[in-house]
Amino acid sequence: MTPQRVSETAPEAFPGTRPAPTTAAPTPGALPPVRTRKRLTREGVVRLLFVAPAALYLLLFFGYPVVKNVTMSLQAYTTKTFFTGEAPWVGLANYEAVLNSSLFWPSMVNTALFTVGSIAGQFLIGLALACFFKRRFPLSNFLRSMLLLPWLLPLIVSSATWRSILDQDSGILNRFLGTFGLDAVPWLTSPSVALIAVVLVNIWVGIPFNVTIIYGGLQDIPDELYEAGALDGATGWKAFWNITLPNLKPVISVVLVLGVVYTIKVLDIILGLTNGGPANATQTLSIRSYQESFINFEFGAGAAFSNILILISLVFAVIYLRANRRAVDE
Amino acid sequence: MTTLEAPALSVPAQRRAGRQRTRSAGYTALGIVFLAVMLFPVYWMVNASLQPSGNTLNASFFPWNPSFDGYARAISEQGANLVTSLIISLGTVVFSLLVAAPAAYALAQFRFRWVNIALLAILISQMIPGIVIANALYAAYNDLGLLNSIPGLILADATHAIPFVILIMRAFMIAIPTSIVEAARVDGAGLVRAFVSIVLPISRNSLITAGLFAFLFSWSDFLFALTLTTTDEVRPVTLGIYQYLGTQVSNWSAVMATAVLSSLPAIALLILAQKFIAAGATGGAVK
């Protein structure tokens, strides 16, 4: 889901995890000392039963879908399949069709613009707000926790609310801009503005997550560093550039990479605001995947889009794990 | 001291000469302004839901003559969907905690050799796009007869919650001293007994945090509601809102009233259970 899933990053939890993709074994040296191998005792079975339900669930609801998407993408999996049960193998035909479809490159570009725009906005505003709230002042904790609200609301509720705010004729935003003599902006109805509007809403949704994580990182920078810096004349912006940013680097890389992973799969906000329109101006890879599967009932093509999405996520997951390891090393 | 800290925004900087007290009052004022800007959409949602005209066309800035027509319509049209959402969300909480709490404890305390691999797998599972899961589940649910069913949606919604619950509870449970459990074991309690009568009560706070988030995740779910239902038999309220939006919005006050009702759990929990929400938001996040 969206940026709001709090990532359980806990770098210290993965002392020896290699930044390798999926099934890589952890480095042997990092394992807790292996005790002498014991036979499967009754106690050992009970211990395994503690994890068995969760393991089974993860296999069925994460493992199976990933595998199933790969096989589906190689099949002609359509409405007919649900009646006849037949899904003939078609090799890479789905990928060929997807790559040659007129919507493929626009949706790639939109996914990139949506992701980069959202993350840049969320991160910069999040960083500024986190720095602001780091100064202790009356009510600072209360105000900061109230800031979490946009993050806790159902995304479809946020979409509905923003749709009324961004409405071209009656929306409060255009009425507000009108008081400055500005023309009404067709936020969600013009192909040239819609993507910007969607990005703006997604920035709003993502700010609390960024503030929370960056604020946590700021708290961990020891005050002594600033005190020492002040003796050398590093105050204000200088302290920010020379002390805050370098020390925040591991947190920043994690927040950015996670932001990418959570943003490229965003679906609710775009469906609620524009449904991928107007004139396909807000089509992204996940919207394509949804529409191919559940509007056109071309599950093969939908799965092909999904797999492209997974592939991109995987690249960033690897970057994330590397960044995470660096955070541990430092 | 304050001046040594990370600089924030320029307005406070100008006040550097001012006295400490005026300065912090200034910060508070500025913080309120930031919060007001961020929460304006929420205010507008509430305001629009109380407008009498039925649309936001002439919505005034404050509902001087609040009308509850929107709510009347929302409850008559979406009341059943709200109940459906509530049942599914509570079901997700129970199911997620049952599955995830023992696993979290095991991963925190049992020193399995493959703990790191398991944690990596859980972390990666959180990154899998929901549409991937929906694509595959639709076909599987179709065969199993789980489309349009509450158990089907509970199982699917738990994908939002279970990895999160395992990781967050493990982060708490890793701090439980082994001596406590060992003492009980010496007294003859089995592993399960020790878990139920000692570990779970100690972990009460983390259970509450995990449960609250499982509830919110499931309550907010839109993707599975959209893809795994085909009739209006079982219809969570998120899908109800989406359908309002689809059918050429003519009655904004009913849409916004439904939105307000759907926001109540989040708002209530943020105010009443702030401690737990804050723990969930920061717990385990990069530190």
Image (cartoon, coloured by chain):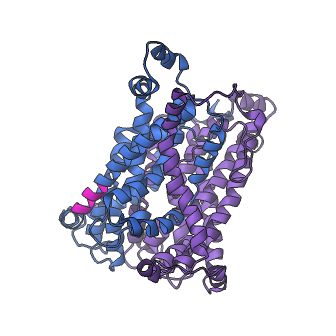
Q: In this rendering, would A318 be left or right of A44? A: right
Q: Position of residue A160 (x, y in %)?
A: 38, 67
Q: Main secondary structure of the magenta part?
A: helix
User: Can the viewer see residue B89?
Assistant: yes
Query: In this picture, which residue range is highlighted in magenta?
Result: B79-86
From the top left corner, tell me how far across and down residue B132 is, in percent.
54, 65
Of A25 and A302, which appears nearest the observer?
A: A25
Q: Quadrant of the C terminus of chain A?
A: top right
Please tell me whether residue B270 is drawn above or below residue B187 in the rendered image: below
Q: Residue B82 in magenta?
A: yes
Name the residue rendered at 41%, 80% in the picture.
A83
Q: Furthest-right residue in view?
A: A232
Q: Which chain is purple?
A: A
Residue situated in front as seen by the camera: A304 or B145: B145
> In the image, what residue occupies the spot 54% across and 62% down?
A65
Say which residue appears at 67% left-offset and 64% top-offset.
A312
- Spot the blue chain and give its letter: B
Say above or below: A186 vs B277: below
In percent of width and height, residue B263 lies at 34, 55
Q: Quadrant of residue B248?
A: bottom left
Q: Which is nearer the eye, A123 or A243? A: A123
Q: Is residue B9 left or right of residue B157?
A: right
Q: Is residue A160 visible?
A: no
In the rendered view, tell whether residue A84 sits above or below residue B129: below
- Residue A94, percent across and down? 62, 81
The residue located at (48%, 13%) in the rendering is B186
